[in-house]
Amino acid sequence: MQIAIVLFDRFTALDAVGPYEILSRAPGAETVFVAERTGPVRNDSGSLSLVADRTLDDVPVPDLVIVPGGPGQSAQMENETLLGWLRNADATSTWTTSVCTGSLLLAAAGLLKGRRGTSHWLALETLKDYGVEPTGERVVIDGKYVTAAGVSSGIDMGLTLLGRIAGDRHAQSVQLLTEYDPQPPYDAGSPEKAPADMVEEWRAKSRFILR
Amino acid sequence: MQIAIVLFDRFTALDAVGPYEILSRAPGAETVFVAERTGPVRNDSGSLSLVADRTLDDVPVPDLVIVPGGPGQSAQMENETLLGWLRNADATSTWTTSVCTGSLLLAAAGLLKGRRGTSHWLALETLKDYGVEPTGERVVIDGKYVTAAGVSSGIDMGLTLLGRIAGDRHAQSVQLLTEYDPQPPYDAGSPEKAPADMVEEWRAKSRFILR
């Protein structure tokens, strides 16, 4: 099973590395980071670089596609090199997936039309512009399309998908080995749970440029 | 505040990127990935490279040190270049921290002697060899030393520490923006919760070479 994780300038690191850490542990998985060009790709804050080892052209028929999000997503929404690759890869993929605003890229490629999906909570409504029905769930599976909510939700997506791919016991082993027994010190991880004024503050000054 | 995240060959990616994604969002933080040499550093599975932008020598007095773990930790246990840097950095740091078997590197440098600490559940007992009292907690704070359990626990450590550094409200904002509202599809994330035969299986074939 070949897993392709797409990188682009100003992606969010945990969007990519969360599902990577889980799904790269699937039996027989070959995981490759891909981008338009090989070499280091800078994240949203500019202080982290992940290396793309292969170009998009090098990896035309991955079994599993993972598209992270991040502020850099907006600059890719009309990038036909990337969107065309997503359409072609999707034509033969077993699973096509996203984390955070990565779902807007799948949507812009036309892959989620008429489907249920999710995204970062600040970007949910934008899915509608592409004919996608947003849901408040953390991980949404609609056919072979799996979308996750913001940033850290890619870990939950990874485990959910690993269970489908390799069985519950393998997924549980990976959960045990990555010691994924979350104990956040606060309970503010969703707009329903965070203080209302905090949610409004971020809606007002959203760093996401969504179109 | 300067944050230094230490990279070494065969580190575990999420150990580093989990706390990175949280703590790099502290107000005024400058986060740098450091290693003996600049350039790409390969992770445990070999399919991911994070770039070290600075050498250890370039970053002598960070305010916050983060040491990830991973199978590559064992090859560093007598690396005096790294251990000496850790001792020097610790002499002036505000916080000295680790994720997973990164605590064994802090222990090997002599920094945790007589303190409480934690590590990956498969490595907990090894802490005793260095005069460290292992605990079953996910995040352990003893003075300025903060150690986290395996892999994904670095996210919880990051949020806990961010609260101390920047206040509860800022930490909650970061939790909201990273949508850290974990919903694992299984409940097997610790040796107490996973099936007993699975725990025994991994104890028997532990991939960690601990000394």
Image (cartoon, coloured by chain):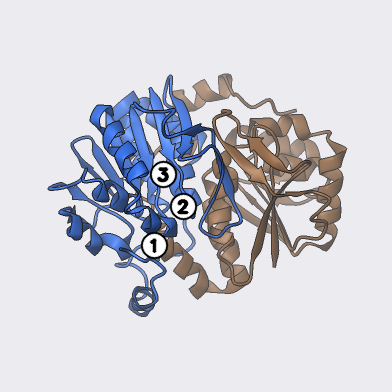
Chain colours: A brown, B blue
Q: Nearer the viewer, mark 3 or mark 2?
A: 2
Is label 3 in a helix, a strand or a loop?
A: helix
| Residue A92 position (above or below residue A8) | below
Other-residue count near label 2 (Cα within 10 Å), few / some / many at <14 / 14–19 / ≥20: many
Q: Are marks 3 and 2 on the same chain?
A: yes
Of A89 and B172, which appears nearest the observer? A89
Residue A141 drawn at (x, y percent): 66, 58
Cα separation, mark 3 vs mark 1, equals: 14 Å
Q: Nearer the viewer, mark 2 or mark 1?
A: 2
Q: Which residue is mark 1?
A: B189
Q: Earlier in the sequence, mark 2 or mark 1?
A: 2
Cα separation, mark 3 vs mark 2, equals: 16 Å
Q: Which residue is mark 3?
A: B155
Residue B198, image quadrant: bottom left
Q: Looking at the picture, which amino acid does disc 1 mark? A: Gly
Note whether residue B211 is visible: yes
Is label 2 in a helix, a strand or a loop?
A: loop
Q: At x 47% / y 57%, what residue is drawn? A: B184
Q: Earlier in the sequence, mark 3 or mark 2?
A: 2
Is label 1 in a helix, a strand or a loop?
A: loop
**Chain that bears disc 2:** B
Q: Which residue is mark 2?
A: B11
Q: Looking at the picture, which amino acid does disc 3 mark? A: Ile
Other-residue count near label 3 (Cα within 10 Å), few / some / many at <14 / 14–19 / ≥20: many
Would residue A179 be found to the left or right of residue A69 on screen? left
Q: Looking at the picture, which amino acid does disc 2 mark? A: Phe
Residue A116 drawn at (x, y percent): 70, 51
Note whether residue A193 is visible: no
Residue B197 drawn at (x, y percent): 36, 80
